[in-house]
Amino acid sequence: MTKKIVKGALFVCLLYVLYAVATAVILFYFPLDKKGEAPPNDISGFMGQGDSSDRVLLLENGYESGRARMQMIQEATDTIDIAYYSIAKGKSTELILGALIDAADRGVRVRVLLDGISHGLRFKMSDARFALVTHENIELRYYESFKIFKPWTWNNRLHDKIMMVDGRLGIIGGRNIADKYLAKKPPKNFVHDRDVIIFHATQSGESAIVQMNKYMNELWNHPYTSDPFSDLSKRQSTKGKKEKDKLTRQYKTAIQENEHFVSPSMNWMAITTPTKRVSFLHNPIERFKKQPVVWQTLIDISTEAKKSVLIQSPYVVPTKEMKGYVPENMNSTANWTLLTNSVKSTPNVMAFSGYLDLRDDIIKTGVRLYEYADKHSLHAKSVVFDQRLSAVGSFNLDSRSSVLSTDSMVIIDSEEFAVQLTEAIHDKIDKSTLVADKKKKIDTPKDEKKDKSYRAILLNALSKVSILWRGLA
């Protein structure tokens, strides 16, 4: 009898594995139906005349980016809206959570939306969930929580990184909330990232923050979004109140001791850069494969570039499906430069193995290709077109950001900001290795040719079979 039960259980497990593979993997290998493909973007729609009501601030330093978030929260008087892929452990996280609770104590309405699988509020961070929702002015929801019997939902991840305050301040980029992004003393897993502050200076006229807020509301009220904390148990409520008190004490102690992280004094008007226009774009909210709105927009703008296209992306995996959106008559007069991670710096083995397999195809495009070779890794996602239009956000140059995840960017029309962003990218290029230029590989240093580390061997081995997962990595 016991053997029959074991065999039956194994059979059921096998059926489930086959079901999961079919609906979470194989199903996503079918190409996207392009019948609903949007027409090419008219790039003049991203350009403005004269100064717009939005000003911007490039946040290249992670610690200062954390302080900017802190000041936004401290200045809030009405609303704080947050949509993040994850919130992970660290002192910076605890202080930001404490500031959110303090804002809620002042009567500010706080909404926090996190990815339902990668939200980070587990283990040591698990009580933070209850600390937030036990406050009457704070709501916490998950986008697409894990559903064991709906494997096709596993690929529908919320990958945005957005915070908005009072309709006058917004921040968007590649950073989540964690010490690996915001700490003053970088931990081992620290990443070099990038955000941009949008300051709606005049509180009149069109603003990208209005577009961002509309998107936040759409995500917040979507059927894919759930509220798993509407009915806390007595034990959960007790743990939440205890954690809330702890976070509040930490934050108030830091304020009393005038800690630098919690004492920012940024004059938004003085430190921001004027723009002609700031536009917000995002992928559709869909399960299965989405129309690649962000990817197609970047391609359309690139097609019109006459002088230069400068790209930084931590992951570059241009799948066959993505290439289908690149027109055959792609403009070739612009000089293209691409910066990404290297074997040494990449933290994402699966994605980088896909890049290695496709690197020769990338080189054939004629792009000037650099791989980062300094401390930590790159995580920023940015493009500069003709030293005028700049794109900053959460979008990676891979299939996951193109057709699977929610992802968003802002397109900034400002020559002054484009100069700042170009300098920031070139600062990383100065610490990188030139891999190819004008369709030719560049000889690598001897020590790189002889790289026999386990990491290099693993990545090169995986690159040979990366076709099996690079559309999902």
Image (cartoon, rainbow, N blue to C red):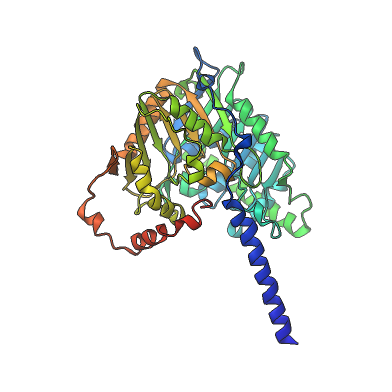
The answer to whether any part of residue 57 appears in the image is: yes
Q: Nearer the viewer, residue 256 or 184?
A: 184
Q: Where is residue 144 in the image (x, y as percent from the top left)?
A: 67, 49
- Residue with the most extreme top position: 50
Q: Where is residue 60 in the image (x, y as percent from the top left)?
A: 42, 36
Q: Position of residue 359 (x, y in %)?
A: 37, 48
Residue drawn at (71%, 34%) of the image: 107
Quadrant of the image occupied by residue 138: top right
Would you place residue 325 above or below residue 28 in this image?
Answer: above
Image position of 285 (left or right of 305):
right
Q: Which of 76 and 65 is in front in this view?
A: 65
Image position of 367 (left or right of 117):
left
Q: Where is residue 38 in the image (x, y as percent from the top left)?
A: 60, 31
Would you place residue 128 above or below residue 323 in this image?
Answer: below
Image position of 446 (left or right of 470):
left
Residue drawn at (71%, 43%) of the image: 139
Q: Which of 191 and 165 is in front in this view?
A: 191
Residue drawn at (60%, 27%) of the image: 209
Residue drawn at (58%, 34%) of the image: 282
Quadrant of the image occupied by residue 218: top right
The answer to whether any part of residue 253 appears in the image is: no
Total marks drawn?
Answer: 0
Q: In which quarter of the image is the N terminus?
A: bottom right
Would you place residue 337 above or below residue 452 in this image?
Answer: above
